[in-house]
Image (tube, rainbow, N blue to C red):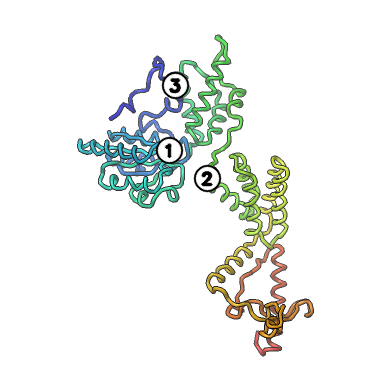
Amino acid sequence: MSDLFAAPPTAANPALNFQPLADRMRPQQLDDVVGQEHLLGSDKPLRLALSCGQMHSMIFWGPPGTGKTTLARLLARRLDAEFISLSAVLSGVKEIRVAIERAEVLKQQARRTLLFIDEVHRFNKSQQDAFLPHVENGTIVFIGATTENPSFALNNALLSRARVYKLQPLHQEALEAVIQRALSEDPLLAPRHLQLAPLLRQRLASVADGDARRALNLLEIAADLATGNADDDDVNAIDGEILQEIIAGSGRRFDRNGDDFYDQISALHKSVRGSDPDASLYWLARMLDGGCDPLYIARRVVRMASEDIGNADPRGLAIALDAWQVQERLGSPEGELAIAQAVTYLACAAKSNAIYTAFKAARADVAAHGSLEVPLHLRNAPTRLMKEMGYGKSYRYAHDEPEAFAAGECYLPDSIAQQRYYYPVDRGLEQKIGEKLNYLRKLNQDWEKQHLGKSP
């Protein structure tokens, strides 16, 4: 086994000054890990497997700073396995080959190898496939770490050979424990006798947003500022002013191309659909706080107006478009406020997905029935030949009919003449639309009964 898990250096070791606090505070044994109780609890499968000395290939999926790398190292230590670490950002086929060759040598010596691939989702399909035979024959125990959803980021072949463990963001109490432990145990911070009031510690943990690495990085900067600002006789206190200085501009977790992005826009859309203006405003604020482009949100709000409100309240679409235009013309913060207004209006508006459902059904019929002919009476006849062929014959001009409605007229292709797509809901304006359509259908039935002898 390498010296990766050797005791941490002492304060007398100059190399310690170049080692980030987050690295210095990595847990040295499994029991020191905070959080992830759903994986490491005494009766959980991962803990039970380790207790029995078993090891299987796995994928650690979770946001940054939740302990994926640390946990992989501790597993190797717990099972006395050789730990080889590669980063998919920096490594290629050559590095993979060298790692496998090392693992094969160790296998001949009856030793196990744990091959850890950080950011494994960045490997392409061929690179991921390169691990499969060596996982199959037991040359390596494969552990991949990813912040992306494995269902989309990893090959099915690799997923079938590895169990996925979802790591959760660290909860507030766990982050506060990490911060306090660093203040009291770190060989560089502890001698400074730094003081951080409980309320400020809570605030720092909150800003870290479930990320232990982020919490420790911010703490290290704050500690340096507190020490630099103190006189010889002063207590090294990390006060509110220092904390505010280092956390200014810190946004919540939001990856523009990752799960957080899609999860949060989904939450916003579903909150609007669910008629909850408070939740809608919260998720809007979360996305803006994380750096999402307001124009992207404005475009999605327009979608919500058509998909979930539709003709139940057509004003919703106009308000959504107005908000988009305000954002384009004025930018922030005026545009963001207009988007918030639109989101709130849509959340409170009457709901209908009748247009969305009708349009989907119509498109499905187009795909299913192919290019059905336009009925002759609906075709224009600008030439004599077209008139002779019957184009436009018997067409009834609606404005010349009673109530501007040509009762009994059919506007669909003959083979789907009775098809119906649009079913207005009994809410908002669509209630009135539904009443109007029912009245017009009654006129059609009366016309057919009178002219064609059909019973309604």
Q: Amino acid at mark 3?
A: Phe
Can you see residue 40?
no
Tag 2: Cα neighbours inside 10 Å, few (<14), some, or many (≥20)?
A: few
> Considering only order in the chain, which callout, 1 or 2, is on the residue closer to the N terminus?
1
Q: Which quadrant would the C terminus be assigned to in this image?
A: bottom right
Rendered image: mark on residue 72: none
Q: Which residue is mark 1?
A: 89
Q: On the rendered structure, is 128 left or right of 274?
A: left
- Residue at 69%, 62% in the rendered image: 312
Separation (CA) of disc 2 from disc 1: 17 Å
What residue would you read off at disc 3?
Answer: 18
Q: Nearer the viewer, residue 326 or 444?
A: 326
Mark sitting earlier along the chain (3/2):
3
Name the residue that disc number 2 marks.
257
Report if the CB atoms under discs 3 and 2 are less than 8 Å apart.
no
Q: Which quadrant is home to the N terminus?
A: top left
